[in-house]
Image (cartoon, grey):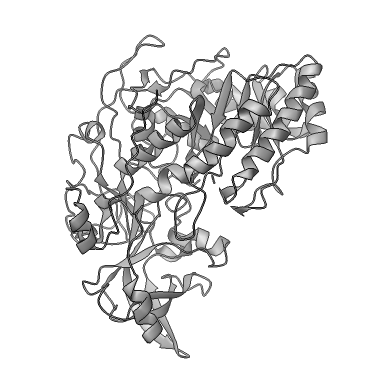
Amino acid sequence: MTAALADQARLDLPGHWPAALAPRILATIDAPTPLLAVDLTTVTDRYTAFTAALPGVSTFFAMKCNADEDVIGTLAALGSSFEVASVGELRILQDLGIDPAEVLYSNPIKPPAAIAEARRAGLWRFSFDSEGELHKLAQHAPGAAVYIRLRVDDSTSLFPLSRKFGAEAHEARALMHLAHELGLHPYGITFHVGSQCATTSAWRQAIAAAGRLMTALQSDGIHLEMLDIGGGFPARYVERVPSLDQIAAAITPALAELLPYRPALLAAEPGRHLVAESAVLITSVLGREVRAGENWLYVDVGAYNGMMETQQTVQQWRFPLWTSRPDHALVPHLPFTVTGPSCDSSDTMFYGVNLPSTIDVGDHLYIGSAGAYTLSYASHFNGFAPPEPVILGAPPRIAASITSNPPIPVNTPSRDQTARDGIAGAPPSHNPASRNSAPREPALREPAPRESAPLAASREPASRESAPRELASRESAPLRPGSREPVSRESAPRGLAARESAPLRPGSREPVSREPAPRGSVSREPAPHIAPDRAQART
């Protein structure tokens, strides 16, 4: 017990835990769990810091990690473009009025029907890494711009991707020539250093490989217009990772030194980095048992309804944890195995994590840095519903657009308050002076018609005017068999209202109303707040 007490003396929340999601604030939410509490101000801060650290690099948010419409709307209002991995993700953007012409389709292997639908919608840039994909693109998106995904070293990432995707360097040159022969436009190069990359040198090595290919193609008369440095930018959990400044210090000189020329578009596809730290997963303790001398804690979230990444890392990845116990920082802590609610024995998230010895049924466990790959992975396995998102903090200009049920108001605690309430300090403030430091209003556009559109290279982000929808809390309980209606429940706090747990089929929602405007016109309306659907969708 002495060691546990010694550890407890140093116990504190990490500095990146959002002040708007402090444990004392989460404890005031009176609604059925599981819930995903989201602070859109943190999303705004992360985006602003990212664009300031990499000036001249355009941001294409990787939707796969979090397709919640409140998050998408916030990023669109800030001027972000988007990267999709499926036509389903593209439909979400279309429903929000975001122009497909501003979107990258970076999945190297795509269904033929998805290629055709995306092209009809106006999306014109597609990735590839094989001869077979080029033939599909030539048939279903003739004349499209294509960018090749290079296989690069991603061995220092938590989630390597190179076995599944990426053309070898010696193949890439011939593939770009084949693209030209098939009537496609050789447009650019992309790569991915792996999700949650832990070394800054990975980007420099990948940029060097891209530079060598650009040099070879230039000698063949092919001048590329884009270099997309992909994703892999890490978020802060428990283990230390390179800071954004350290990563930028590797990327910026590499772009200047290792490329034969600067392409017209330099792009990046951050995902996890922008949203992971913006959310806390609130889960309830269902049971506490001792089995063979081991403390077990059963909670209402597991690998199958929100925490799949703990399975992918064989429970070796640590998330920041806290509890609703008022004596959390006062009593001794014991090691616990934390497992999910399903009947699957592998549905276990954490082993040997220190939690208060007093924790019991009805208490809440707070899982920090839960804004990426939680909702997008969550299923209804065993009838347990995914977490319901609830907005607790939003920038004033975003909150102003939520007229029906605005976010739960939160007064950011002072440094003295945060010390008392279990926060090591207020989260870092990012307000660097740069061309991207202030939010930029997106350009108002009518959604693209579902037919082929001419290629375009406009860098004005898409935006839209829409009627706000209510923030609502959807049911945690399973849907009634054979019904789209969720099981009814008691009233929820402000900022929460009833929504369906199950994802809607594409096209099943009423379209967001928007006024047509000439291409390139600028809207001064605040970004709309739209209640999210569930999008099953890594960066």
In the visual, does 332 lie left or right of 56? left
Residue 473 vs 46, above or below: the answer is below
Quadrant showing the C terminus:
top right
Q: Position of residue 510 (x, y in %)?
A: 33, 32
Name the residue located 39 percent from the left edge and 64 percent from the top edge: 301
Residue 44: percent from left, percent from top: 34, 37
Residue 365 seen in the figure: no
Q: Is residue 292 left or right of residue 397?
A: right
| Foreground of the two, 87 or 177 | 177
- Picture layout, residue 423 above or below residue 203: below
In the figure, residue 24 lies in which quadrant?
A: bottom left
On-image quarter of the N terminus? bottom left
Foreground pick, 495 / 159: 159
Residue 21 coordinates in the image, percent (x, y): 27, 54
Q: Position of residue 374 (x, y in %)?
A: 44, 53
Identify whether 100 is placed above or below 344. Answer: above
Residue found at the very far top of the displayed protein: 518
Q: Residue at x 36, y 28 (%)?
A: 433
